[in-house]
Amino acid sequence: MNERIINKTGEKIKRYAAYPEGIEDRLKQLDQEWDMERMWEANASNLVIIGIILGTFVWVWLYLISLLVGVFLLAGGQIIFHLHRHLLGGW
């Protein structure tokens, strides 16, 4: 596994050395990914707050919203992010 990562990293270094403009493209791509991740985290935080409010004032079972969102946040948002990426880019 580690050897594969090292080989893949070496290939990327060679590719970017031959095509330095690709670095700027990759940085833009990463920035867009980080923006999406921040958006998901902000939306998840809002859902936690809404779940707590609804669980307190409407129906106690609505606390489950906060629980489920919390589980997704503890998973680092990876589940939602990958699902979103697959929905947009295909499997």
Image (spheres, rainbow, N blue to C red):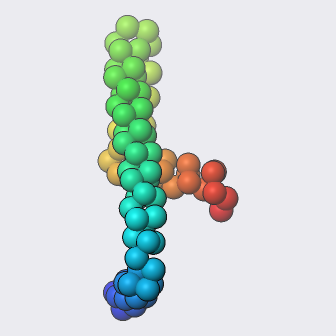
Please state the horizontal and vertical placement of residue 83, each as a whole percent of the image: 55, 51
Q: Residue at x 38, y 84 (%)?
A: 17
Please state the horizontal and vertical placement of residue 25, each as a whole percent of the image: 46, 64
Q: Residue at x 43, y 40 (%)?
A: 40
Q: Is residue 82 above or below residue 3?
A: above
**Left or right of residue 34, residue 81 in this image:** right
Please state the horizontal and vertical placement of residue 1, each as a whole percent of the image: 39, 86
Q: Quadrant of residue 39?
A: top left
Name the quadrant of the C terminus.
bottom right
Q: Nearer the viewer, residue 12 or 47?
A: 12
Please state the horizontal and vertical placement of residue 33, each as a whole percent of the image: 44, 53
Q: Is residue 4 above or below residue 77?
A: below
Q: Nearer the viewer, residue 3 or 66?
A: 3
- Number of numbered discs present? 0
Q: Residue at x 40, y 65 (%)?
A: 24
Residue 44 shows in this picture: no
